[in-house]
Structures are given as C-alpha cells and as structure tokens.
Amino acid sequence: MGSADLSDASTDAAAVISQDGAVVGWTRGAEALLGYSAPEMVGASAGRLLAEPEAPARVGGIAERCRAGNGWSGMIRVRHRDGRTLDVLLRVSAAFRMDGRECFLLSAREERGRWTMAQSVLDGFLARSPVGMAVLDRDLRYVWVNGTLEQLGGVPQEERLGRRLSELLPGLQGEALEKVMRKVLATGVPVTDYEYHGWSWADPHRRHAYSASFFPLVDTDDTVTGICYMVLDVTERWAARRILSMVNEAGTSIGTTLDVLRTAEELADFAVPRFADFAVVDLLEPVLGSETHEALLDDAGSAPARPALRRAAVRSVREGCPEAVYRVGDRVGFLGPPYDARTLIKGDPLFIPVLDADQDPWAVSEPRRPDRIREFGIHSLISVPMRARNTALGLATFARTTNPAPFGSDDVLLARELVARAAVCLDNARRYTREHTAALTLQRSLLPPALTGGTALDVASSYLPADSAGGVGGDWFDVIPLSGARVGLVIGDVVGHGISAAASMGRLRTAVQTLADMELPPDELLAHLDDLVLRLGGEESFSGADARGTAAFTGATCLYAVYDPVTRRCTMARAGHPPPVVVPPDGPAYFPEIPVGPPLGLGGMAFEATEIELAEHSLFGLFTNGLIQACGDVERGMARLAEALARPEPDLEKLCGTAVRDLIPGPQPDDIALLLTRTHALGADHAVSWDVPDDPAAVGEIRALAARQVTEWGLGELAMTTELLVSELVTNAIRYAAPPIRVRLLRDSRLTCEVADASSTAPRLRHARSTDEGGRGLFLVAQMSLRWGARYTGEGKIIWAEQKIPAEQRISAEYRIPDERETP
C-alpha cells in the first residue's frame, strides 16, 4: 500500500472467512496482495497463507476475541503465492452470520518498514475507523456494520442488520445507492468515490455530502456473493465546492446591467431559492439617487445613528413575498440598538442561526417584524452590509422559512461572497448612473432650448439619448438665423460617449455659431471647424488628457447648410456625415448628392459645397447616423426614413416624432437626432432691389425709393432711419468700393437693408475726430440698426443692416404668400 493514509481502506485487500477457516469471499485487492485468484482461494483453507509456526494458535485466539463481539487488528506474517513472506497489517471484524454461517471480515495491507505505529492505535481499527464500513448480502441486506457507519447514519447496528438501506433511509437517496450496488453485483466492477447528498438521522437538520466506494465479494466460481462498501463524510469539501460554484454562477447572473435597481433585483433573484427562502436588499438613499455620501464613510463617530435606507428588491419562495414588512420603494427602518451606521461601515455580517422573535434586535425598531417572524416561521437569518471601494451601499438580508436547516458558518461565508460581488456591481452601476446623468444633463443644456427658422422655415426636432449601456453620445443640431432672412442648419456627431463627448459637442456647437455669424459659406465653415478639431485634439494629447481619465478629442462628423428663402436655394457641405433628405411637395423623397468630405479632425483635405433649389413647402431633414443604422443596414435605414417622411402630415412636430418611433422602436446604443424643416419662400412683395449708378448724385434717388417702399409696407415710422442707413451704405460703396452696386430691402421678421458691391475690401468701423468732415458712416449705421455686418459672395461683398419691426406690424410665421393649392 506504500504511503497511503491508514484511514483510507478503499484499496485494502479484503476477504470473508468462515468460522472453520474456509475462504467465503475474496476480493481483487486480496489477489493483488497475495497473488491468489478468487477461484483458487474461495472454499479453500485460509491457513495455507500463514507463514509462522505459532500462527494457528494465535489465529484461534483472534477468532475467540471476535466471536465475543470485539474486532482485532495487528501484524501477521503471511506467504505470497510466489513463496515470499509479507508482513501485513490485518484487521478482523466482530463475527457476523452470512448464509447461516459465522463469518469474519478481514482487511489487510502490506506493512512497510518505514511505518511505525503503536498497537493501541491499530487495535479495533475496523470498529473505530473514521471510514464507515458495511457488508451486505446479495439481497442488499446488512450483515455487518462498523461503529463509524452507525454514527454517520444515526441508525443503530441492531436495527440495520437484516434490513436494506432503502428501508432505513427511504426516498431517492437510498434507492439511488441500491441501484449502484446492484450494478456492482451484476458486473463485478467496483465503484469508487460515488458522491451523494442528503440528510441523516444523526443530523436531520443539516444537509451532508458523502463519498462511498462499493466492492464486490467474489465466490469460487467467480460470482459475486455480496457487497462491501465504505463511506466518508465529505461535507466540508462539498460545501467549499458549492461556495465556489455559486460564487462563479453569481458572477454571470448579477450585474448584467448598469442599473442600480436591476442589480439589486438580480442579487435577490439569485439567492432565492438557491440559498435562502426570503431575501431583501435595502440601499442607502444616496445610492439610489446617485448622490455622494462620503460623510457616512469616513468618520464613524459623526455618522448618522439611523441611516436612511430604501427597499430596492425583495424575493420569496412564497408568491407575493408576504413575509416582507416593507415593499420596494419604501423607506426601511434600520436595525435596532446596538446596530447603527457603524454596522454598515464595519461591514461584519449579522448572523442569527436560531431566530427568536421576542429577542430579535430588529423588533425594537419595527414592532410588525416579530408577528411576521412567527407567522411565516422565519427561523434563521444572515444580514450582510454591502460595501465596495470603501463605500457603504446598503444591507442584504437572507432568511430561511420553509427550509428547516438553519444557516451555518459556511453559509455566512457564501453570503459575504455573494454580497461582495453584488456590491461591486452596484457601485459600478451607481458610478455609471451618476456620470451618465451628468453627461445627459450637460448635453441637454448645450442643445438649443428652442428652435426657430423665422419666416424661412418651419422647424421641428427630436433627440433620443442612447440607452444606459451605450452611454451618452455627442449628437447635436442647431438652427442659426443669418442675415438676409437666411437660416443656417447644422447637425453633427462627436466620436465617443460620456461627459467628454458631450463637452466636445458643446465646443463644436459654439464654434459653428461663431463661424456662422462670420457669414462663412458652408465649405469654408467646415474647413475652419476641421482646424479647430485638430487643434483641440493636439492640445488634449499634449496635456495628458488620457492619463487623467478623459478621452482626447478624436473627431466628429458634421453637415452645414444655408437656406435662402428669397432665392429658394440651399447651399450645403458635409464632413463625413450622412446627406440630408428632401421631400418635395409633389415628388418622391430623395437624398441630394453632396461630395463626401472627410470627418472633422483628419485635416489635409478640402470640403466641397453643393447648391440645390428647394420648392416652397419642401421637407428638408438632417439626421445623425444612429437613426439609419438601427436596422443594421444603412441603405435600408435611409429608405425607411424617406418612406416615413413622405407621409402627408401637416404637423411637422408630429411627423418628426412618428418617424423616429417607427425607425427606433426600442433602446438604441447610439444617440438619435432628427432636425426637420419645411421651407417657405419670401415673395416679391417682401423683397425689392435697385441698381445704383456709380454717381454720388444717385444717393438721393435711392433714398427716396427706399423710404417710399418702407411706407408702402406699412412701416412709415422706420422710413427716416431707413433713409439714413441707405444713404450711408450707398455713399460708402460709391466712395470706397467698385461697381456694380445694388440695394435690396427685405421685410420678414425684421427690416433689412443690403448694399452689394464688387469689392472684397472689409468694412472698418472707426471713430472720427470732431474736426473730421467724414468717416462716421459705419458708426452711424451701427448706432441706428439692431445689428449690422458684411458677408462675401463670388462677386464681392454685401453690407447689411437690420432694424427691428414693431410687434404689431411684424410678419408672423403664418403671414406668407398662399400656395396655389391653398384657398386664400
């Protein structure tokens, strides 16, 4: 047997000897030890194996001792089949009857020279072995049982003898073991380390695990005459494996989302009924609110005596969780004295193996609890504080009601592991929720609170943030009023998610507004924006933004368009962004062919502008790629968008919302933005123009024409100011610019005066000295107008000035030239 443990008898040579010395049973272990096969030995005398002259007398004494009900163990010398002698450690059981004969069970192993052991230790090994052992006949009825098996099962020897295991331990466990033993009887092949679980009469309130080995007893004709089996209690090993298995399983079941309440529910769902019959998770109110609560953590002395907890999850094996005093969302009373905030800070579990409703500390703070404990038989409880990263999160409580076994020390360890894993997931969810909320708040604050297209456009928009798993993105859109009744439309998408993306979006939106105020055409505006993104990315990389945990500005896509309601022309350019969608009033939807510029932040490539004409009442829509990528196919998504917007729906807001819901029916991993506009034309009765001769004498005539036109529009109170503006702007153009010179008056929500010339020289506002005869033209323009500026065209520049129209005379969004299809 070498260095095998003496308590391991599973590989010993075993034999059954009758009272007359004949061999009744011979195992393969005996054959391996002494070289004799079962046919050679069964029925033969065992005396042939003795190798000492005094052995027969000694054997007789051993037999008498065993007949008296005592086992024997000791050293004896035997002879191997090949003639050599062996010193073996022999164990002989007390006598028992088998098939009407008195028999003894012998177990032997070879004694090695390096083993030294006192005789007192070996004496009575079979009877007092830590391994439970028994012999059964072919009918699987007990014929011999040692004391250890009696202690393991809790059934006395006298009650076992002559009876079957299924009679003593009814149920699936006994029947399953007998099934294994019948297989050994039928095949003659031993079964070792067969593990099973169950309860015993010795410990009926605790589940145990056992490992059993079954060996056949072989007769002379090589038939099996009985079963010898050995049992070990391996509950500790099984409990350790169970803890490891459940903890690993919990890792895949708890924390599947970044949602605090859902994570709490997953912990309760996992624990019931695997571990407990009733489970609740109570979280600190700041955790549910994603607020900071460091005061509870750092100084136990200043912590509140009764922390504010709210129920986040409750589960029970009983439908409706009738054991619960509080429901999800309720404010929960904390433990009674001496338990307070220090309980959460210290983090040690509260373990009550046997719960007494009258002495339970919880009853002090909640009188209803003792009644529920008695009514539903809550008899054992474990309450574990939830902590992660030195942050107190709440309390998880597990109780047993229908399961009669109380919690043990192993269960406390398992509860701690489960709660520790759940706490990390909860803290991740809490931190993410806090950042997600901050990013969403930042993003919404940076988006325009209200959009207006003036008299040029009806505007509607829809924005959907990404679901919590994807994180807030950097989508943005804007409508920017420009001079000459024109409107700038912009939409973009910053690469990445989170606060950094939202902040980058805010930077770009501000930059677009600034560049648009400079009256830059779309392609030039995108070029300046590209330079800005390159500079911002370089600054953040140089300053080590990544090392601080903030993602560097990596790029964005953008589309910028300018619509002129006078010419009904729309000029646009795009930087890696999807093209807009156009739905004419009498035609199918289409996507204009616009050259695809590179995304912002790459640099080194030019952007190209495209100009199209839009019929009045056309639908013009800008969107981010999240809207068309939801179905997994961009082309299919664009086709679905065109189909959704082609519906006859006069309410632009309703059409915008319906289109988004149709394309995005559920949560999506990316932000969604849709900006819809319906175009209007500024008719001939709202715009007039005159060519101006390159002669200072023409200024007076143009002044008179402008004053007459303003009066015809019903704005006589603005006639004098308009005369002055026209006079100064035309005089400057004749004096400093180049012909041709043209004046245009526009009336929409404001009165605009424009003077165009062929010069590209920028106008300069200066303050003339009191002795100067001139130089005050643009200064006067700035003082008399609401705002003024200059924009450049392919033919030169336009200097414009706007005046505010009184509210009672201002053109409304509904005051436009009726469509031919409408009834006046």
Image (cartoon, grey):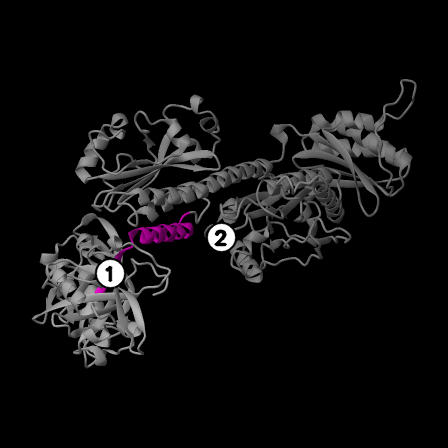
Q: Is residue 67 left or right of residue 781?
A: left
Question: Quarter holding the N terminus?
Answer: bottom left
Give the image location of residue 72, x and y in percent: 19, 60
Residue 742 in sight from this viewpoint = no
Point out the residue furthest to the front here: 53
Q: Give left or right: position of 614 versus 34.
A: right
The answer to which of 247 and 754 lies nearer the viewer is: 247
Is residue 300 positioned above or below 182 on the image? Answer: above
Question: Which secondary structure, mark 1?
Answer: strand
Vertical arrangement, residue 360 with respect to residue 447, above or below:
above
> Magenta segment: does it hold 53?
no
Asked if residue 441 lies left or right of residue 789, the reply is left
Please identify the quarter of the rendering in which residue 384 is found: top left
Q: Disc 2 and disc 1: Cα gap in Å?
A: 84 Å
Q: Position of residue 674 (x, y in %)?
A: 56, 48
Disc 2 marks a residue whose amino acid type is: Ile
Q: Nearer the viewer, residue 211 or 672?
A: 211
Give the residue at mark 2: 664
Q: Residue furthest top?
A: 770
Which segment did they paint magenta? 229-254
Choose the circle earlier in sequence order: 2 or 1: 1
The label shown at residue 14 is none
Q: Which mark is residue 74?
A: 1
Q: Main secondary structure of the magenta part?
A: helix
Q: Residue drawn at (28%, 64%), measured in percent from left and top?
A: 10
Looking at the figure, which quarter contains the C terminus?
top right
Measured as percent of width and height from the top left, residue 804 is found at 68, 29
Q: Nearer the viewer, residue 3 or 505?
A: 3
Amino acid type at mark 1: Gly
Mark 1 nearby-residue class (10 Å; few <14, some 14–19, many ≥20): some
Q: How many marks?
A: 2
